[in-house]
Amino acid sequence: MQFDSGPRVRLSEIGVDWYNLYKQRTRLNQNWTAGRFVNSQLPHPNHPAEGHTDDIYAIQLQGKHLVSGSVDRTIRIWDVDTGRLVGEPLQGHAGSVLCLQFDPRDHEDTIVSGGAGGELIFWPAARVAGQRQDVWTIVNEAATASPVQPIVNMGQGFFGYNPPEFVLDAARDALSKVECNQYSPTKGRPRLKKAIANAYSPFFGRTLDPDKEVTITTGANEGMLSAFMAFLEQGDEVIVFEPFFDQYISNIEMPGGKVVYVPLHPPKDGATKTTSAGEWTLDMKALEAAITDKTRMIVLNSPHNPIGKVFTKQEMQAIGDLCVKHNIIILSDEVYDRLYYVPFTRMATLSPEIANLTLTVGSGGKNFYATGWRVGWLIGPEHMIKYVSAAHTRICYSSVSPLQEATAVAFEQADAHNFWDESKAEMKGKVDRFTQVFDELGLPYSEPEGGYFVLVNLAKVKLPEDYDFPSHVANRPRDFKLSWFCIVELGVAAIPPTEFFTDANAHIVEDWLRFAVCKNDDVLEQAKERLRGLKKYIQ
Ligand SMILES: Cc1ncc(COP(=O)(O)O)c(C=O)c1O
């Protein structure tokens, strides 16, 4: 577990001296075989490198975790079943860790610790602390370490260019209106709900009710959090396909849900020849086997990030029918719904029974190249939308007013500007332009059927054996090393996709990297030029 250090308080400021705290340190549960932790700095005979490098002063057991603090100034969390470290040591104390205590309210994994420097650190709850160094931090660190500056950032999926002028004009205009600078109704501005209902009714084959079947959220992400908050109770299970958009996981876990993973499988010959993203497959038997009495929801993403797969109508139908059979709510994340290069099916359009349990997620940020606007929405039956709105009201009350108004105008005017067709053609052009370099290098890739991510297989790239990767990269799967290497040696950032898998299934994509092509053409050309530097490492 890699925690960032929480706020520090001088003990003297709150009238406690460290010696008293030290004396009060909690005693070890006698049932735990503590010897190997307490009397030795090496917690596990087979994994000595994981041990403390000095005496242990404080220790506490909670659930299946044992926490120890040491003169070496670190706190380590152990799995009591395996005796192994649960992630990275917590660093942040200026002196020996003298005492530690779980949150008095008994919240698992929330720790307070006192150190010889006289400091008390409130470590954050595990839900916000992250399990290990996140991919974005590693990519940024590599970018700083690279001699090639500035880096061409093909990693994160933000647009390298502005929304079209008619959308920007709408935003400027909205800012000058008094009512657009004040709270919007919690469910969203009527003009935006109407514009969305009008835009989507033809796709859904019926007239959507803007007041009952549409609710506006702060980006698709907060919309999904609201949906999970609305329907999950502690211990309810949610099925998520791997690879997954990483926000799903915390959004499910925050309300107490449990994620159940089902992997998508790459094309068998994906390492040797370029294939279609459509050839990534879902094992329907594995999906059905993952369903239990506790399965409450499933998350589906089409067009898919990061694979670029657009699920076929047959695949969607099979998934939808299964959900109807087991009464499972479908959260259909369709944020890339305007960027598809093969026929695209919307889950909610497949049958009235499927529509009855489907929440469709949309994003103004993705649709109009404005990810920073944080305007999203959910469309679904009234009996579900009303609870999503209720959760959203409690999470953030309402969403950004002027940008809701601007998104409404963007929808109203999009067809007149032929925006949707042009947007799709432009993005497909970027995919084709960028992937040329991999054709040239003979590196196979998964050709996206939608969205703006390209997965490239770099199994043929031989990394120098003696290459000096930092330890937190060296002990991650090969795609992290590929990513680090491309950033530092070539100056091009791409994302290691094992980040979107569980450890058990990470091997499926350890030779791949994800590139986002939603960048200006000159940036794409510069990235291509730099990537040609891979030639000498290809075997
Ligand atoms: C699959 C998927 N869903 C949802 C989102 C979040 O969308 P928004 O920016 O509207 O919150 C993203 C953003 O990258 C995404 O890739």
Image (tube, rainbow, N blue to C red):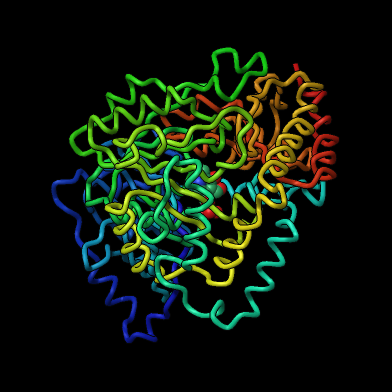
Hey, which quadrant is residue 58 in on the image?
A: bottom left
Task: Please tell me whether residue 471 is drawn above or below residue 448 in the rendered image.
Answer: below
Q: Depth check: 173 or 486 in front?
A: 173
Task: Please tell me whether residue 433 is drawn above or below residue 457 in the rendered image.
Answer: below
Q: Can the viewer see residue 55 in this picture? A: no
Would residue 326 appear left or right of 287 to someone viewing this image? left
Q: Position of residue 500 (x, y in %)?
A: 50, 38
Q: Depth check: 122 or 120 in front?
A: 122
Residue at 61% of width from left, 62% of height from top? 409
Would residue 273 appear left or right of 165 to someone viewing this image? left
Q: Position of residue 70 (x, y in %)?
A: 38, 58
Q: Quadrant of the C terminus?
A: top right
Q: Depth check: 483 or 205 in front?
A: 205
Task: Please identify the residue farthest to the left as the structure is shown.
Answer: 31
Q: Can the viewer see residue 290 in this picture? A: yes
Residue at 34% of width from left, 85% of height from top? 14
Q: Position of residue 440 (x, y in %)?
A: 81, 22
Q: Depth check: 170 or 46 in front?
A: 170
Would residue 267 appear left or right of 141 to someone viewing this image? left
Q: Position of residue 137 (x, y in %)?
A: 59, 52
Task: Please tell me whether residue 167 is drawn above or below residue 516 in the rendered image.
Answer: below
Residue at 42% of width from left, 80% of height from top? 10
Residue at 44% of width from left, 58% of height from top? 222
